[in-house]
Amino acid sequence: MKRLRTSQGARLRVWETFRLNAEDAAWATGNISGAAIVFDAEGMKVPHPIPYQGSKRNLAPQILAHFPERINTLIEPFAGSGAITLAAAARGLADRYYLNDLNAPLVELWRMIIEEPHQLSKQYEKIWRDQHGDRREYYDRIRNEFNQARRPHHFLYLLARCVKASIRYNSNGQFNQSPDNRRMGALPTTMRDHILGASHLLKGKTKCASEDYRTIVRRARPEDLIYMDPPYQGVCGARDPRYLKGVLFDEFVEALRDLNSCDISYIVSYDGRTGDKVHGHALPPNLQLRHIELDAGRSSQETLLGRAAVTYESLYLSPALEERLRTCRRHAEQKQEQLVLLEAGN
Ligand SMILES: C[S@@+](CC[C@H](N)C(=O)[O-])C[C@H]1O[C@@H](n2cnc3c(N)ncnc32)[C@H](O)[C@@H]1O
C-alpha cells in the first residue's frame, strides 16, 4: 500500500495491488483489482467509467428484472452514463447495443471508451497526475480547454471532479459547473479498470449516436428493447441547464404513442415520489403502460433532514413488452411441465 499527499495535505490511500497494465484479459477472466470492481445489488461485476448525476447504476438490477429474453438491440436514447446498457451487457442480455445522447461530447467520450480505451486511460492518467498546485486554477484551465476543443478526456476529468458529477451549461452551451474540491477524481488505475471493462463489454456490438431521442426510437424493431430515462420533469422544458435541451412532456407522450402503434417494447423511468410527495406528472393511462414503483431507498437529502421517507422511482412497461414477458413466462411454464412429464415417465 502506498500513501500519496494531495496538494491540500489530505492523505489519499492508494492500493497498489493492481497494475496499470491489468488490461482487458484480466477483466474478461474477472482477475482484476478488487479495488476497482463495482458489484451491483445482485453481486454482478459492472464497470461504470462515467461519473454521472442521475445514473441508474443502483437501480439497474430492479430494472433489468423486467427485460424479456432474447433482445436483438438494446436502445438507450437518453444514455448518460449508460448504466443500464453496461449492466445488461455484463449479463449478456442483448446481441447489440445502441447508445444515444443529445450531449455530443458525452457521446464522443463513449466512442473513445469503447474504441480507444488504452489511449483514453493514458490521457486521463496524465491529466489527473498533473493536478497539483492550485487545483481550482487547474480545473478552470481544463474547463476552458474543454469549452474550446470538446476533447473527451477533458470531459471525463471534469465529470470526475465537478460538483455531484452534475453537468451544467450556460446559455451559450459552455460547461460552467464548479469543481468539488473534496473530489480528486477516480484514481487512474481505477478509471482504467472501468474504461477497459466497459470497452470489453461493448466493443464490436455497440453503435453510438448523438441525436434527438425521437429520431432514435423510430429505428426500433419489435425484437429490440428501448430503455428510456429522460431528464426529470422538474427540469424539463425547452432549456435545461443540465442537458443543453430538455424533453417536452406532450412530445414525449406522442413518441410513446407512436411506439405503441408499432408494437415496440420499451421501458421508461419517469420521476416518482418521496413518501407522499409526488414528483412530476404520471404518464397518461391511455398509453396502457404498466406502472411499477422501484424502491430507491432514502435520499441523502431526506437523511440529512432526519426524515425516513423512502424514494420510489416510477417505471413504466409498454403493452408490447408486457405481451413479450407473458409469452416468455408461458414458454418457461411449458418447459417446466415437459420436464415434470419426462421425469414421471422415467
Ligand atoms: C436522466 S439522464 C440519463 C441517465 C442515464 N440513465 C444513466 O444511467 O446515466 C438524461 C439524459 O438525456 C439526455 N437528453 C436530454 N434531452 C435529450 C433529447 N432530446 N434527446 C436525447 N437525449 C437527451 C441528457 O443529455 C442526459 O444525459
Image: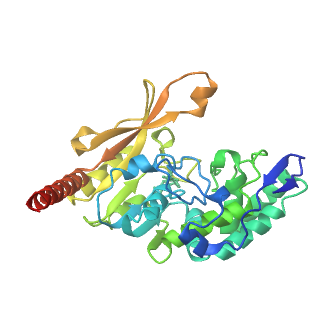
- The residue closer to the viewer here, 123 or 69, is 69
Give percent across and percent down for residue 220. Answer: 31, 65
- Please identify the quadrant where the N terminus is shown: bottom right
Give percent across and percent down for residue 107. Answer: 55, 66
Task: Find the residue positioned furthest to the left.
Answer: 345
- Residue 311, compared with residue 199, is above or below; it is above
Residue at point 49%, 66% (across, down): 210
Is residue 276 left or right of 255 when viewed as pictured? right
Is residue 238 among the parts visible in the rendering?
Answer: yes
Write down the quadrant of residue 154 in the picture: bottom right
Residue at point 26%, 66% (across, down): 223
Residue at point 68%, 76% (across, down): 119
Q: What colour scheme governs how the chains and residues are painted in the rendered image of this protein?
A: rainbow
- The residue closer to the viewer here, 292 or 11, is 11
- Please identify the quadrant where the C terminus is shown: bottom left
- The residue closer to the viewer here, 103 or 34, is 34
Count numbered badges in the picture: 0
Give percent across and percent down for residue 242. Answer: 58, 48
Is residue 248 among the parts visible in the rendering?
Answer: no
Residue at point 42%, 68% (across, down): 97
Is residue 63 left or right of 333 when viewed as pictured? right
Is residue 301 left or right of 216 when viewed as pictured? right
- Residue 27, compared with residue 251, is above or below; it is below
- Residue 244, compared with residue 205, is above or below; it is above
Task: Find the residue positioned furthest to the top.
Answer: 306
